[in-house]
Amino acid sequence: MKLNEKQSYALEQVARGKNLFITGPGGVGKSVLIHKIKDLFGGSTVFLAPTGIAAQNIKGATVHRTFKFPIGFLGVGARKRVSDKAQGLFEGDAIKRIVIDEISMVRADLFTAIDHNLRRIKKVNKPFGGVQIVLVGDFYQLSPVLNNRSPEAQYFNAEFSSVFAFSTESWQQAGLQTIMLDEVMRQSDADFIGALNSIRTRDSEYCSKLDYLNKIGDKEVNVDEPLFLCSTNKDAETINDHHYSDIKGEDRLYQGIKEGNFKDFPVPEYLNLKIGCKVLICANSQGDSEYYNGQTGYVTALDDKYVTVKLDGVQDDVQIERNLWEELEYSVVGDELDTNVVGSFKQFPIKLGYAVTIHKSQGLSLDNAVIYTGRGCFAHGQAYVALSRLRSLEGLHMMKPIGLDEVIVNSEVKKFYEDNKYSNLMNA
């Protein structure tokens, strides 16, 4: 895929060794840019993410596995404690840069720990020990997790004023240049894009834009059994179970094959399917059949090797094979950066396709969906993520209008972006 002007500019800045924060709304090609960086600089770059599934998506490793950080709050001592693994990985010159995807989910203590570890390993009191940092993500969408009722919250709040990485001294000292990608590729309708941007930032026009989308979404669903985007796991499970139990016929169980230390399952380890059930595709095809992540369809045949699916809007049935997901860790052999498979999971890239949570729809591009918020959206960015999964207004449906109070935008995030809106130095 050919890069647009800002993607190309970002790639040039990576080549120049600049510390970058690459951001933008959903569907602007942030993942495309990460894969391009990997193509050009993969031999000297580690690609990290805060969760196993996010790491799988970029064929990288998790931050915790790479640095061997303990799970939970990282206090001063834990942030400075360097593991033998991290020491051996970063002490030489094999790694020139670190790319961290989904940076919005990296909590302040974890982000600070990366910085402090690298300073100690490199024995240089420079941000991240002088290693180039490329941060990718959108703080208007997913947020870091901190349960304020948990014991760790007391320790965290005593030291940090905010959960967000951008609030830390490590972020401020890194000299990051912000590059805002703004050419939306998921949607093509200018009115839809404008409405989504307004809701994403909760700007002065968001009330009228939300009313516009609510009216468009209030129409008869144009598919027999749509995919529901739900605000809670309970609602999604209830819808899936209800529709699945209504299907007559034999139930077939497919057990995934797990090897090694694989932790984050992208699809069910135990997958129950019936002929006639609706499914959601959860990976792009690797073989002769053509299908992509986010497509929906109905199972037409089941055997040991394939699940055959009639995809919505596609004439011919496709045979879907088991997909292989791998969890990786980095190592340095001699002076060369290498990856090792520490765990794998083989399963059909399928889950029931009647409902999915808004959180788990992150990254999907959908032709049709019904937004079902139940008692309402309750989290920062949730309404925007749901609406922005749709490719077009034609495929947008709502069980009920989204309320103005359901468009929740964290005030810290809004201020951060307003303070940085002039830092995209395209001509630097």
Image (cartoon, grey):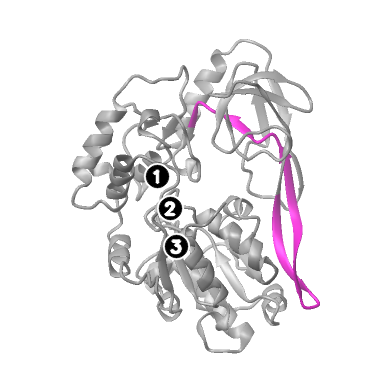
Outermost residue on the bottom side: it is 124
Helix, strand or loop at label 1? It is helix
Give the residues in magenta: 326-355
1 or 2: mark nearer the eye: 1
The residue that label 1 is drawn on is 385
First along the sequence among labels 3 and 1:
3
Residue 184 in view, yes or no: yes
Name the residue at 63% across, 83% down: 121
The residue most toward the top is 248
Q: Is residue 223 above or below residue 153?
A: above
CA gap between label 3 and label 2 equals: 23 Å
- Residue type for callout 2: Leu
Q: CA distance from mark 1 to mark 2?
A: 9 Å
**Residue to which mark 3 is pinned:** 6
In this view, which residue lies farthest toward the right?
334
Q: Please give left or right for residue 313 compared with residue 96 in the image.
A: left
The answer to whether 94 appears left or right of 1 in the picture is: right
